[in-house]
Image (spheres, rainbow, N blue to C red):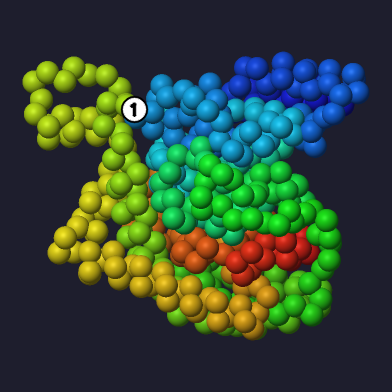
Amino acid sequence: ISAEDFTAKTVERINQIDDKVHAFLDVNSDAVERARQIDKKIKSGENVGGCFGMPISIKDNICIKDSRTSCASKMLHDFIAPYDATVISKLKAQDAVFIGKANMDEFAMGLTTEFSAYGPTHNPWNLDCVPGGSSGGSGASVGALECVASLGSDTGGSVRNPASFCGIVGYKPTYGLISRFGLISYANSIEQIGPMTRTVKDTAFLLDIISGQDPNDDTTISNSNQNYLSGIDAGIEGKKIGIIQEMIGDGIDPAVLSATKNAVSKFEGLGATCEYVSLDMVKYSVAAYYTITATEAGSNLARYDNLLYGYDFPVEGYEFNSYISKARTKFGPEVTRRMILGGFVPSAGHAGKYFLKALKVKQKLTREITELFKKYDYLIAPTVPILPFKIGEKIDDPIALFLVDINTVTANLTGIPAISVPFDVSDGLPIGMQIMANTMEDKSLLQAAFALE
Ligand code: GLN
């Protein structure tokens, strides 16, 4: 099949089903033409990049030059990115086709995609359910066969959570492995762009393309030109795996628990040894995560003041405070909550009680996990302790929503790589298993994920 035909079929599929799924905020009208150009290159014997016209959706907080990048917010409803994110330039160089911008929770805050200012995305497995989030449009677009792969961003689980809920693979790399240049920041000290694909091999393939040090992002690290795809079938014989007890405790859905036990049996069948381990700080991780991320969000979102970005209204008749309050009313409820929290927790008189304590939890959690990785090659837990739930079911209970992140935030707070692999189905809804490895052990992590797949 030619790149053009494949892309045309993909667009046809989007036209057929996306009014039900609503994975996309914008579909790229040039996609088929771009694929035609790639076909031309192939025919004329020119060098063609490894993606060969692969249609990829991109979360709407990653900049593609000359495309709208709204972060699913009214605040950026008309923001046209003036440059490409590094991941986008790298994919362009490999002849990927960007099929469209994927829906998300506004500014990546949330885990259901219900906080998009442009309406929720539906889970392709059951349209009444949430697709997870915040990269829910990315997850649903891959799960609903509206593209081959997607890029999401993961601050506290936003790649892995929708991957789990949409029955696909979602990968959060070691912090610094993938450039964040061109990713609109939410909590930049812990977030990463990550591939969302149907297979672990596709994830390794994309990681080979998009990872590596970037002069435009000083937090990137060298990956010594690792090839993640080669040797992916190395297996896990003789490996030691810890099952994190605190991540399968109270409130876990019985189907998710039994899937976890089956995953353990599968790993054992493949020659690994598994035992239960304790990661004590997990019980404070969600509180620490929301304290740290709200603080960073507070400063990252301070730029949306209606001067450089935003929307127009006449400044006459306002003094500073009323002007800023009016400018900020364009944010949705979740972003507003985070900004209020982000102003409070690091403020004078409160920082010691909240922000500094959260940093201590982060440090202790990192110490605990480093200790565990002296004994174990991998740590596992279900990606999300519950099954995809109905749209609207938890939207009025922010704390209940926060707690759904319990199994994913650890990897962000400690910088380690983590992957969600689709493992089981219960009541027609998918269950993802999460595997974590030590910092920079991304290659070995992908081997374990491939073994489990
Ligand atoms: N649910 C988490 C939050 O709202 C994770 C979001 C993310 O990873 N971007 O912050």
Q: Is mark 1 within 8 Å of ligand 1?
A: no
Q: Does residue 204 lie above or below 327 as drawn?
A: below
Q: Amino acid at mark 1?
A: Tyr
Going by the picture, which residue comes out furthest to the front? 215
Q: Which residue bears the numbered disc 1?
A: 309
Q: Residue at x 52, y 63 (%)?
A: 415
Residue 93, placed above or below residue 290: above
Residue 162, position in %: x, y?
56, 49
The image shows residue 93 at horizontal and vertical percentages of 71, 32
Residue 350 occupies which quadrant of the picture?
A: bottom left
Q: Label 1 crowding class (10 Å Cα cut-off): few <14, some 14-19, many 20+?
A: some
Against 75, is 128 above or below? below
Nearest the eye: 371 or 225: 225
Q: Residue at the location (16% across, 20% down)?
A: 315
Q: Residue at x 79, y 72 (%)?
A: 236
The answer to whether any part of residue 31 appears in the image is yes
State the residue in front, 234 or 223: 223
Residue 430 showing in the rendered view: no
Task: Check disc 1 and report its element: helix, strand or loop.
Answer: loop
Could you say where residue 314 lies in the image, as x and y percent from the top left? 18, 17
Q: Quadrant of residue 140?
A: top right
Residue 301 lies, with reference to residue 231, above or below; the image says above
Horizontally, is 207 left or right of 304 in the view?
A: right
Location of residue 29 (image quadrant): top right
79 with respect to 203 (left or right)? left
Q: Quadrant of the N terminus?
A: top right
Work out which quarter of the rendered image holds the C terminus and state it: bottom right
Count up the numbered dots.
Answer: 1
Task: Left or right? Give the position of 400 relative to 413.
Answer: left
Place of residue 408 in the rendered image (x, y in percent of width and height, measured from the top left):
51, 61
Q: Residue at x 44, y 30 (%)?
A: 70
